[in-house]
Image (tube, rainbow, N blue to C red):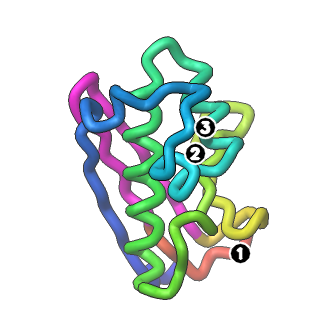
Amino acid sequence: MTVKGVGIDIAEVKKFASFKKNGEDRFLSNNFTEKELEYCFSFADSSIHLAATFAAKEAVWKAFGRADMLQSAIEVRRNGSGYPTVWIKNRPQKSILLSISHTTETAVAVAIMTNRKK
């Protein structure tokens, strides 16, 4: 397996604390998909999951190394086991490995782009 790109990002949870589930917020609508918002707001403390998802999207964007890719094209989903997977324009990306971790204060994500197809 060849590594083609690596991205890492860290986000402060408190920066996401003011967002509300049914709020009309330009930041949320520009940076998260509906599926991501559903996932994040399914938890009592959505700010942790918003921060983690945002960090993951940033890490993926950095791994791609392309300034022309919109963050809104990147979607982080969880599989049946809760493992994060990356989707670009509604297509699963098997070549991107993603790891997310968080505390109550910070969230971090690492994305590795490979030549893996399966």
Q: In which quarter of the image is residue 88?
A: bottom right
Q: How crowded is mark 2: few (under 14 residues within 10 Å), some or many (20 or more)?
A: some
Q: What residue type is labelled 2?
A: Pro
Cα–Cα span, label 2 and label 1: 17 Å
The residue furthest front is 24
Disc ID at residue 117? 1
The percent position of residue 94, horizontal first and vertical second, equals 67, 66
Q: Nearer the viewer, residue 65 or 80?
A: 65
Cα–Cα span, label 2 and label 3: 14 Å
Cα–Cα span, label 1 and label 3: 28 Å
| Residue pictured at 54% horizontal, 74% vertical | 70
> Magenta segment range?
96-111
Disc ID at residue 84? 2
| Residue pictured at 38% horizontal, 40% vertical | 51
Is residue 56 left or right of 105 when viewed as pictured?
right
The residue furthest right is 91
